Image (tube, coloured by chain):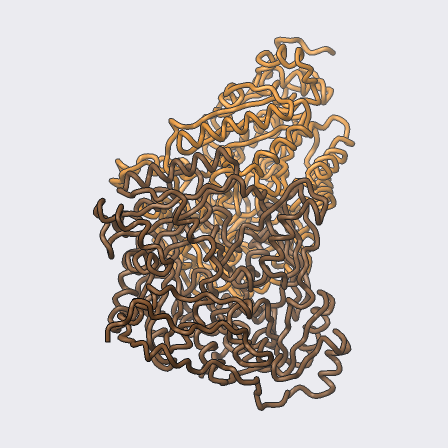
Chain colours: A orange, B brown
Amino acid sequence: MKPTARFRPAWSESAPGAGTFRSIAKYGDPRAFKHPSDAWVRMMMQEFGMTEADFSRKRDQGDIPVAIGRPSKLSSAHLEALAGIVGDKNVAVDDYSRLKYASGKTAEEILELRRGIVREVADAVVHPRDKNDVRKIVEYCDAERIAVTAYGGGSSVNFGCRPYRGGISLVLGTHMSSLLDINETDQLARVQPGMLGPAYEDALEHAPERFGCRRRYTCGHFPQSFEYSTVGGWVVTLGSGQASTYYGDAYDLVFSQEYVTPVGSFKTIEAPATATGPRINDIMKGSEGSFGILVEARMRVFRYMPENRARFGFMYPSWEAAVDASREIMQGEFGRPAVYRISDPEETDRGLKLYGVPGFAEPIMAKLGFEPMRRCLCLGTVEGDPDYTRLVSRKVKQVAKRYGAVSLGGYATRKWEPTRYTEPYMREDLNDFGILIDTLEAGVTWDNLHRLHQGVRAFVKSRPGTICMTHASHFYPQGTNLYFIFVARMDLDEYVAFQAGIIDQILKHGGTLSHHHGVGRLLAPWMEAHLGPEQMGVLRALKRHFDPNNVMNPGGQLGLDEIPPRR
Amino acid sequence: MKPTARFRPAWSESAPGAGTFRSIAKYGDPRAFKHPSDAWVRMMMQEFGMTEADFSRKRDQGDIPVAIGRPSKLSSAHLEALAGIVGDKNVAVDDYSRLKYASGKTAEEILELRRGIVREVADAVVHPRDKNDVRKIVEYCDAERIAVTAYGGGSSVNFGCRPYRGGISLVLGTHMSSLLDINETDQLARVQPGMLGPAYEDALEHAPERFGCRRRYTCGHFPQSFEYSTVGGWVVTLGSGQASTYYGDAYDLVFSQEYVTPVGSFKTIEAPATATGPRINDIMKGSEGSFGILVEARMRVFRYMPENRARFGFMYPSWEAAVDASREIMQGEFGRPAVYRISDPEETDRGLKLYGVPGFAEPIMAKLGFEPMRRCLCLGTVEGDPDYTRLVSRKVKQVAKRYGAVSLGGYATRKWEPTRYTEPYMREDLNDFGILIDTLEAGVTWDNLHRLHQGVRAFVKSRPGTICMTHASHFYPQGTNLYFIFVARMDLDEYVAFQAGIIDQILKHGGTLSHHHGVGRLLAPWMEAHLGPEQMGVLRALKRHFDPNNVMNPGGQLGLDEIPPRR
């Protein structure tokens, strides 16, 4: 049956009921929705052989109250001791809390939550009020061999906050969520780990009003999960923001850190550089809660000058041209753009449909010979001093022209900007009708980019009816990342095997196991093969040092201890 | 007695005799010399109350043949086993080799060598031919509990290559000193650890002729020790080059590394960024031979475009103005200069004398009110794309003017450039007449810079007749380094105590123990106080992991094991 042009599914627009599985599964603001465009629906019907009937019945929405059916295994003595540290109202053992703070945002978790399936949860949820609480909790739990799994914003896409060994979920966002001070001389912000992105950025942008500063600042870190991820989470999972090409990855933004571990608490030394042996500040980054709890960080901040932001966009005749031009830009020694993204042919064409703007470029494109499934979109911004943004914009344009691109001006970037944090919202609509969407990503050198791209695509596209969109969005002189988005009508069992196959392909073709999503338990089974036994040995030695009783996020995180079966 | 204007000491101009202590003590090229200017001699006579007679008799030049008077403690079976690995001619037990490869370039070592004093030496010197040799040597030495101390270029200023526990000196520069390949797509050079700076840079600059590349490259790393330090040494001691403000410190230049350790050999993963747990590539940097031997590194390289280099120089009315302007430049978000240096008032004035150019600026300075012992010299370069160098030069100048500086054009930088690697040569002349010169340096945040500067100067200047020149030469948005140069007529015993007092002051006033000189044994006694027991515990846990039998550079390196008394 040919789909009618005006068909539109009855997308959900109602906030999840309080206490339901759906309220945990749904991304972000309970009252916010983002629906696929009509063109996208038509495309999915075509690609997946779906009919209007297939879009008439929603399945497994999770609109039932959470009930986990398993009592807390923590003794009342333990619960009293924990309440003695943080106060009664900061310890919870109810089903809803235990499930909520055990859940992240993997495709698998969402689909299971929609069906009311409950996997491992903690025995209690604890909300520390400050770093002294954290110190006492870690001391107590270490002495009593109670597992501690940290929970920041819950945006993990790798089961990083699933409490595989029970114990407690330690929720850092409830009370430890403030910007403590800004040092303008050093351009450093001292921030608590549980602060969400928007609150952090807002405080920095309002530094004069809130902290009596002379200037406004920006954090420079804007991941897609910005609204529901925490500063501490960015650091301990090695995140990257959309403007990382200029501002750096979370790794680069961390000036110093304070940790609580089972073997003691410490602040790393505070200096822009030091030659005093291996840098503890860097050793702690990426530890994903396995060594201890990040309780405070000093983050590098930047002058906030949105008035200088320049936007650019280009259409390249081919992926090869887009990649070569991007490399030339990153190696050209003339400064760097802030946001910089290139989409492969499939993402470019589907993206034009997704954003509902096929009209804006098609006539120009056609006339100039930029063919569908060959052409590639590039968009981005330049930030900083006004003369600098002008220079870099001009240079980017010069390079683009040399590689055969046509300029789209700021249009594509302006269309993209409002969507930069909202795409995860679309997942609920797709899941409603049995369509699965997920992502995997890898770091890669320029020299290996095409091999990785082609290798992963060959595997994914060998499955009929599978959309695979790829972009690169974090650039360095030596390479970039590839970010793969998969959309298919597929059940969860099939997807889990399919996902494992894609990860195999990423490693086989020389990508890193993760560029900025972290490892968690999802990728843990591949860590030994990826790093090799010698380097895993280094991570395990650090784990043994910091956490001799294996109470910090135990159960396979980073592949440091035995990895339990996930399902 | 008033010194006569035309007095000039009879500086040494003869190359050291073969096999003498002096041939080990002398810096750099045996036939190269750099003498203090006449004005400097007059200044020293004044400051130190010296007469022409004091400059007539040279002392302790070390012109006697090396004899160490202690036989190798390695059994002939061990020596045969080592020769079985590397070949007979690559094992040496003669006195000269054992002393040469046990010596670095601390003030203390030089003065002791001049007097024929021998401290700890290895029992044998081994020159591995390749990384397989290194693997076999480390395996053998680990099994037999023979200490292994790596020797690169011997430019250590902290006893980093002194074999405190005997065993072998492992010399990496004899055979393992090649640039293996250049990957132009990724702008990466694969290099052996024992390659000296000039050979490395020369190979990169001649990449088209030597490797068939399309472009010329530069390593971006030019420490003062450039001519006599190795790429491997830069990495394992966390060095910084004079152009680090743009190109980054050695830490930033290392893309991936291959190590041989007692618990195995490994290459770190190759990607521009990764989120796969704490980064082993970074954990190894700064390990100073204590975890294992760096046998190969892939280093980031840059397009070599010397034709675009812009030079600038300014005189600031005060140190405060120079610091404030520098901070504004580093935080201005318009790109960064490559070389960037500011000299404090004492260095500025003595520097004008040292370079023999008081005439060039004095009339302008005086007219404009730039007073001696207030004014501060700033010099530097901008490298990269020509439009970028123009932009950054213009911006630097704008900021400088806002802070009251007068431009000197490229003059000061052009005067400085030929001296950039030659200053260490002057030490021999000073030592000849009982004058001691040495340096210490620290990383520091902007906010703490003046406190550190004033604290160290107050201590140093409390000793009459002590010159203390300070500059900052490696800049970051969050701070810089302070590099202190001391010149005094002082004997070694007094200096050792004085040096310890300065290090105390650096820590007391919030500097790091080292910005780019590394730790070695010199600074090891302060490590625990600087990092705290928790962070030292991390380094010791790594040491135990990599080197359970404590054979890799044992004897106090980095403060990881017991620190033996030095004298």
With respect to residue A261, does B165 lie above or below? below
Residue B21, given in percent of the width and then of the height, sits at 53, 81
Residue A513, given in percent of the width and then of the height, sits at 65, 46
Residue B385 in view here:
yes
Q: Residue at x 68, y 38 (%)?
A: A449
Q: Nearer the viewer, residue B187 or A246?
A: B187
With respect to residue A464, does B551 lie above or below? below
Q: Nearer the viewer, residue B260 or B110?
A: B110
Residue A532, given in percent of the width and then of the height, sits at 68, 57
Specify whether A121 is left or right of A362.
left
Q: Nearer the viewer, residue B211 or B60?
A: B60
Residue A84 in view here:
no
With respect to residue A36, does B4 lie above or below? below
Specify whether A470 is left or right of B431.
right
* Quarter in which the C terminus of chain B is drawn: bottom left
Q: Residue A344 falls in which quadrant of the image?
A: top right
Q: Nearer the viewer, residue B67 or A265?
A: B67
Q: Residue at x 62, y 18 (%)?
A: A353
Q: Residue at x 24, y 76 (%)?
A: B1
Residue A114, given in percent of the width and then of the height, sits at 58, 34
